[in-house]
Image: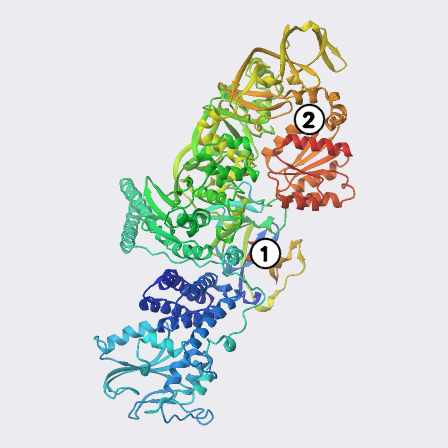
Amino acid sequence: MNAKDDHIKKAFAEESLEHLSSIEEDLIRIEKGDTGPDRERVNKVFRAVHSIKGGSGFLGIQNITRLAHAMETVLGLIREGTLDPNAEVTHFLLKASDALTHMIQYLDHSDKIDISETVTALENISAGSRKNTNIPSPEPNPNPDAFADVALDSDPGVQPDTETAHDNDPITISARDGSPVFVLEKSDYRRLENENKLVFFVEIPLETIDVPGEKYLETISSQIKAYGTMLVYRIEKKYVPLTGTDESGPYILLLFASVLAKKEILIVFDLDDRLIHTLNQTSGLLPTNIQEDTPAEARVPDPYIPETAMPDPDPVETDTCIGEKASEGLQRQDRLIHPPVRVDLTLLDNLMTLAGEMVLSRNQLLQAIATRDPQGIQRVGQRINHVTSELQETVMLTRMQPMGKIFDRFPRLVRDLSTASGKKIQLIIKGRRVELDKNLLEAVTDPLLHLVRNSIDHGIEPPDIRENQGIDPVGKVVLKASQGAGKIFIEIIDDGRGMDPDTLAKRAVDLGLITQNQVRNMDEKARCALIFMPGFSTSQVVNDLSGRGVGMDVVKSNIESIGGKVTIESQPGLGSRFLIEVPLTLAIIPSQIIQTEAQRFAIPQANLEELVRIPPGRVAEKIEFISNAPVIRLREELLPLVRLSDILQLPRTYICPDNDVLKTDRRHHIADRRSSDTGTESAENRNRRTMPGKDRRFHASSALNVAVVSTGSLTYGLIVDELQDAEEIVVKPLGRHLKSCGAFAGATIMGDGRVALILDISSLAETAELMPVNPSETSYEKTDPRVTEKKEVRSYLTFRGAPEERFAIPLDRVIHIEKIPARHLETMGHMTVVQTRNTTLTLCAIDDVAAIRAVPMEEIMVVVVCDLGDRTMGLRVTGPVDALETSEILDRQTLSQPGISGSLTLDGHTVMVVDPDQVARKRYPQWYKDTPVQAASSDSVNKKTILIAEDSAFFRNLIKTRIEAEGFHVIAAQDGQIALDLIKTHVKDLSLVITDLEMPHMDGFTLTRTIKDNPELAHLPVISLSTLADDSDLEKGQAAGVDDYQIKLDQEKLLKSIHTHILDI
Amino acid sequence: MAEEINRIVTFFAGESLCGIDILETQEIIKTTQMTPVPLAPDTISGIINLRGSIVTVIDLNRRLGLSEESGFTDPVSHRIIIVRIQEESIGLLVSAIGDVIDIAPGDLAPPPGNIQGIQGRCFKSVLRHEQGLIGILDVATVLK
């Protein structure tokens, strides 16, 4: 029963959506028509709305019926010519058609959607129009559909029978000569009445039709099936209709029961209204008296009168906004009714043939197996191979849909936007026939809508301004699709004011998205691309046209998520051009299969830049590993490295080389790998002896396999265990339980029938928190290598620490360089000093403070004397010392640590830049007595324990190492729940809690609240961490009791905050 | 409504005997090679290939909060009950399959507050049976 209902509903929805898809365009054309409304078109819309109403009436969906009815009334007036389809009328009709579409998409919820506003508006329009044209509104009968029937009423001799008199008599319908034509049992009539149906007596003259009666009857019955039930029919060779002409002729007579009103029945049958008669419940039709008196009919419940027949829509969950907002809420839980896909008939035939081939091959295969004919099996195997490929290709073709499908939505959008903004816009659409995979088509729809909105909103100037500039006041927006090289190109071009790179840059700076310095290093293209940054908007006033809150960054990420890209070209005053490139299809993608921890994964080729294999012997040399961030230098570009198993939180294992047993790899982070890997033989041996479990990297299989992947703005290296084949894989969606875990774009079935997950490269980067804090920095350096030429030139003094580590110090901090014999060195307390030039110079080496290799002590020391403002300090280094100028931008993230402010790439080498102030502060904190760092340093700090709760292994390790370097003891937890358990067990040792906000199981807010609510724990200061400072998070955090709020990547500030809070205890 | 159930498939989730309306099941399959999904909630055992579709398999033991461990001591008896809900097939990994039991309308009772620590809301009713009480799975809730 349910299934059947569902089936009917689905069919209704599919059909209705198809009707609605064309209504929009038609309505706009009707509005535009200069020579009055196009009757044919109005009729078409009328019929469409009408059949929706019929269907929904049948299904008892009241809201849809009600709205469709109101629309129909207005359309009827337009058709009659009594109502001018002006902008206002069209607006409400469009709104109503939107609401209809929405309700039909969410059929089961349609009655919860509040449509009363639209209905009232439409009713007012029809009522107003009627008043203006002096059509008398029949007071006793508010049903406008009764007009036609009322007119018939003027026939004399109406004998309204009383209900009681004929209660059980059958209703007889008689011809003009009194002979009975049909007899209808009263009980049948009642039943129909209870179903809100009216019964019509229809006389169809046959002379108007060429086909023979029987044949015609067949056609007609199939046509009217959708609108009601044909109760009975007969064909009369000689028949005189009840009214009108006296001539006799062949007629088809039928009784038709329907929920529709007479007015609509006229359209169904396309007949003169004199030939259709409504039966009333008291009597049949007398020879000359057509009994259609108003009072009688008024008793028939009319489903279209909202006041009487419609109960109020469920007031519990009323959506006042029918548009996007309502759908958001519904989208997830509810079935969205998918419109059907139209497929070319020849394509279907091909599919059919192929399916036949497939069956044939199967039979042959079965036979070959039965007769054990190996050659036969091989032959059939080949055949199946061919047929399958062809079948696959053909099925793929059925998914291709013309761009027109989404382009057709734009005239409406442009109309609405131009009306709302007062701008005049001409929309030019090209390439409607270009075909694109259905899923992709859907995926580009929203970005396209947004870009067109953006063009109209920010691009096209108001007509007066355009006129003043001497250009056509009508702005042009071009939507163009084309195909080439396995890709679809979609362009959105406007001839508006274009984008001024400088304004954009200024705005970005004002918004705090980038710094003035960064702007200086950007070319025009890069500045234009700023609008793709999160949080960017040029509009001074946020208006509802540009889809508030949904910025161009979303457009960009949406397009990138389907493997496409979007670029901008713009010239101030001439217009802008957005170019979207998307692949033809997504369902089958070429991909690289990789393996990590015995699990296979697929990386889409679109994301794959290259594969790098570093032989075991060269790992140390190829990977620069300083501080905690492993990087690989690939053609002079620093590439962050992450281990896939770390991101996916897979326990790392290794095969013990001694006995081939699988063991858990106990190394905590990639740093361990390299910590003692100095590349010398002795170091290797020492390592082998002391830590037998860690020698995996010297094993033959421990070559590093790196898949270099990119996601538009970010390129990084994924360390995997094994690189396997490149394969074409079929993308299959993951179930809804797995949608939320990110990291995967889907799954695929491998040749052996097992499932492999497809990696979502950009989500992975997010999970690993690899996203650069400022995406512009990396992307712009990449988009234009020339940018560096414009950068500020700075002078550095370069030197070395350990022979293989290079350092630099800003030249302006250097007073002079001295060579001092090591024997002059004196240690006083914990200070190292030398006597030189009659003064005492305090000495230190960078390895005193930073986690770098030891600076070897030489007989004649090279000492760089640095200026610290009010004092000087000697930095013990090794040669060769050189000075050079560079425009390289200091990378403050990758290698930053105490004493090291960042890194530079100079002549193909990574050089760490020393910050003498930090070194001094760290080494000789007593010089900075007034700052908290001093008090917190040395012994007192060492005993303090800090707990870090952070779900990203990457960040957890990063922060942990950094804080440990500061001399704290660190306990790490990967989520709030674990953190809480650890806090409870370690509460005596703990001094401070640092927590991420977004974590699985228990988030940072809950953790903080739990700590602060527990009297035993409440004393612990809590510092919360987040990737980006967001005011709402900040407030929420404060409400939870967070003591301080820090941004993850600003480690210096975090450290300062730690010191401050630890001191407070 | 519970009264409409007239036949159930029984199965073991860990040690507990549970039942599922036979009409809610699509098929029962032996455990095939399962691909674990990293980062997924631990109630999810993994995904399998069911004739070309990817099916998420839920570890019913964990889902019902029966044990932290998935409690699958004898992998040979493990089965996956495939249920179809909202046009998606989802697998429920159970320890073993029991009998198919016919139910008379009066046999079912509303679930008591808890059954061996199982959260009552995962069961829509309870069947009194000679083998003991059998909780009838509320599939929609379990799959939430």
Q: Nearer the viewer, residue A887 or A609?
A: A887
Q: Nearer the viewer, mark 2 or mark 1?
A: 2
> Vertical placement of A494 versus A597: above or below?
below
Query: Residue A237: x percent and y percent?
Result: 23, 85
Q: Residue at x 24, y 80 (%)?
A: A206
Q: Nearer the viewer, residue A223 or A378?
A: A223
Query: Residue A1023: x percent and y percent?
Result: 69, 38
Mark 1 falls within which chain? B
* Colour scheme employed for the rendering of this structure: rainbow
> Which residue corresponds to mark 2?
A966
> Vertical placement of A723 versus B143: above or below?
above
Query: Residue A679: x percent and y percent?
Result: 54, 16
Which of the image's four quarters has the C terminus of chain A?
top right
Observer able to see residue A889: yes
Which amino acid type corresponds to the residue marked 2 in the rendered image?
Glu
Alpha-carbon distance for marks 2 and 1?
A: 56 Å
Observer able to see residue A402: no
> Vertical placement of B99 versus A556: above or below?
below
Identify the secondary structure beneath mark 2.
loop
Q: Residues within 10 Å of mark 1 (few under 14, many from 20)?
A: many
Query: Residue A703: x percent and y percent?
Result: 49, 24
> Vertical placement of B100 versus A267: above or below?
above
Q: Residues within 10 Å of mark 2 (few under 14, many from 20)?
A: many
- In the displayed structure, does residue A745 sit left or right of residue B131? left
Identify the secondary structure beneath mark 1.
strand
Mark 2 falls within which chain? A
Q: Nearer the viewer, residue B85 or B19?
A: B85
Q: Are marks 2 and 1 in contact (CB under 8 Å)?
A: no
- In the displayed structure, does residue A872 sit left or right of residue A355? right
Which amino acid type corresponds to the residue marked 1 in the rendered image?
Cys
Q: Which mark is residue B18?
A: 1
